[in-house]
Amino acid sequence: MGALSNPFDPNQILWSGCPCGLHSSMWEHQLAVGQAELEESRFYCVSAGEENSGQATKNVEVQVADDVPEWEDEEAVVSRLVDSAVMHGLFGADTNRRAFLRAVGTGTAVAAISQFFPLDDLKARVLEAKGPLEKTKLKVGFVPITCATPIIMAAPLGFYKRYGLDVDVIKTAGWAVSRDKSLSGEYDAAHMLTPMPLSITMGAGSVSRPWTMPAVENINGQAITLHNKHKDKQDPKMWKGFKFAVPFEYSMHNFLLRYYVAEAGLDPDKDIQIRVLPPPEMVANLRAENVDGYLSPDPFNQRAVYDGIGFIYKLTKEIWPGHPCCAFAASQAFIDQNPSTFLALFRSILDATAYSSNKANRKEISAAISPKNYLNQPTTVVEQVLTGRFADGLGKIRNEPDRIDFDPFPYHSMAVWIMTQMKRWGYVEGEINYQAIAEQVYLATDAAEVMKDMGQTPPEATYLNHEIMGKTFDPWKPEEYVSSFAIKRT
C-alpha cells in the first residue's frame, strides 16, 4: 500500500491514512475499530460497502498489494502514477473510489474511464516529457563570491543529487576564464555575470554564440568599498583621479559604478580610472594602494573591513534596489543537446535559490560555502554578508537584511537596461533590437513555467519599470533612455 498501489484495486489505500478513508491516520482508524460500539467516542469506522449507511463496523478488509512496481522500473512507475492521478482527480477520496470499483468492477471501471481519459496516451506523453538524463556528470564553473551562493551550496547541501545529478562545481579565478571555459565546452554551465550571456550572444568582447540566462543567481549583494585613507571623501565629486577596480567589463559592477559617478558629474572614462581585477585579487590591491576602491562582489567588501583595510561606502542596493548581479547561464547548444539534463539542473538551481532566499537558512549556508574549496573565507565574513548584520568599517554595526537576496526570475526589462548601458558607454554600436535579444537570452517564460511546476510563484510580468537613483527606466523606451544622459559615449 502507498504511492504505487493499484488505484483500480478497491482494497488498496491510496490517498488517506486509513482503509476506510475517514481518518487521518491508521492510529485513529484502529482506535475507531476498537471503540466502534461506544456512542460517546468521537471515532467511528465504516466498511467500504457501507460508506453511506452510517453503520459502524469492526470488519474492514484491506489486502496487502502484491503488484506494486519497483521504483527502478521507470515505465511501470509512471504508468501507476498516471492511473493514480486520474483516479484521484475523479473521486477525490478513497471511499468514493472504492465504492465505485466495487459497484461496477475493475474491468468496467477501466473501460469507462478510458473513454474520457486516454490513459495510454497520457502515460506516453509523461514518459516522453520526462525522458532519461542525457548525462549525469556535469561541470559547473563558479567564481568564489557570495553571488554564486545557490550554485555553490547546491553541492554540499545535496540539491544536485536530489535531481539525479553528480555536479563538480569548479572554482574559477575570474570571469574571462569562466567565459572561455564555457565557450570551449569545458564547463556544461556556469555562474556568470548577468551582462555576460547578452554580450556573448551579441558578440561583444568575444565570439558570438547563442547563450541563455535561465535564472538570476542573486539580487543586490555588491558594494563600493574605499581605502581607509579616503574616509573624508564621502562626496563622489571628490573622487576625480581615483583608480577603481571592477571584476569584468561586462558586469553590473562596471555599469553601476559608471552610472553612479556619472550622476555625480564625473566621466568614468576621463575623470577616474576603471580597471578589471579578478575578485580574489581586490583586497590585496586595495592593501597595496594600487586602487583607491572598487565596486565588487562580496565577500571582498566585507573582507576589506575584516582586514582593517577599507570601509563600505555604499551598498549597491542603495543605487538600484533589487538589481540583478550574477546568473546561472548555459549555451543554447547545451540545452538543445541535453534537454532533460538541463531541466534537472535548472530545477536544482531554482530549488537551491529558494532555500537561499529563506533568511533562516543563511547561517547554515555560510558555513557550507566558506571552506577552502569554495569561498575560502572566514565564516564570520560570509555570515555578515548573507545575514546583513555587519560592521561597515566606519565604526557602525549595520542591519541590512536585504544586503543580498536571491530571486531567480530573469526579467526581460533587466536585460534591456543592461543593453542600454552597453550602448551608452560604447560597448556595442548601431541599432539594437532590445526586446528580441532580451527574450532570446533571458528565459523568463521558461523560468515561469518551471517555477509553477515546482510550486513556486513567478511574477506575471516579464517587463517592469525600474528606479535607479530616482530616475525611472521604461524598458519600452530604451533609446530615449540612452539619449537622456548628459555623460555618455554615443
Image: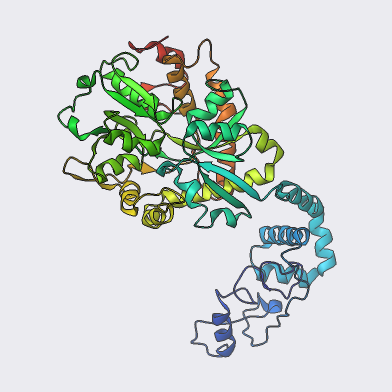
Q: Is residue 471 visible?
A: no
From the viewer's perspective, is residue 213 above or below residue 363?
above
Give above or below for 88 relative to 178: below
Q: Is residue 40 left or right of residue 46?
A: left
Of residues 107 and 291, the one nearer the viewer is 291
Up-down relation of residue 245 to residue 60 (above or below) = above
How many numbered dots are placed on residues in this image? 0
* Quarter placement of the N terminus: bottom right
Query: On the image, which quarter does residue 265 sit in?
Result: top left
When asked about the image quadrant of residue 83, the answer is bottom right
User: In the image as oriented, which residue stretches furthest toward the front?
Assistant: 288
Tell me if I can see residue 3 in this picture: yes
| Residue 202 location (% of width, % of height) | 57, 21
Give residue 52's position: percent from left, percent from top.
65, 74
Front residue of 211/54: it is 211
In this view, 320 is above or below 270: below
- In the rendered view, how is the structure colored? rainbow
- Rendered-image quadrant of the C terminus: top left
**Horizontally, is 275 left or right of 139 in the view?**
left
- Whole-percent x and y of residue 97? 70, 67
Write the residue at 56% across / 76% down: 25
Q: Position of residue 33 (x, y in %)?
A: 59, 87
Please identify the quarter of the rendering in which residue 238 is found.
Answer: top left
Question: Is 165 in front, or is 170?
Answer: 170
Residue at the image point whose x is 53% and y is 35% from the top: 178
Give the residue at x 63% y 55%. Answer: 164
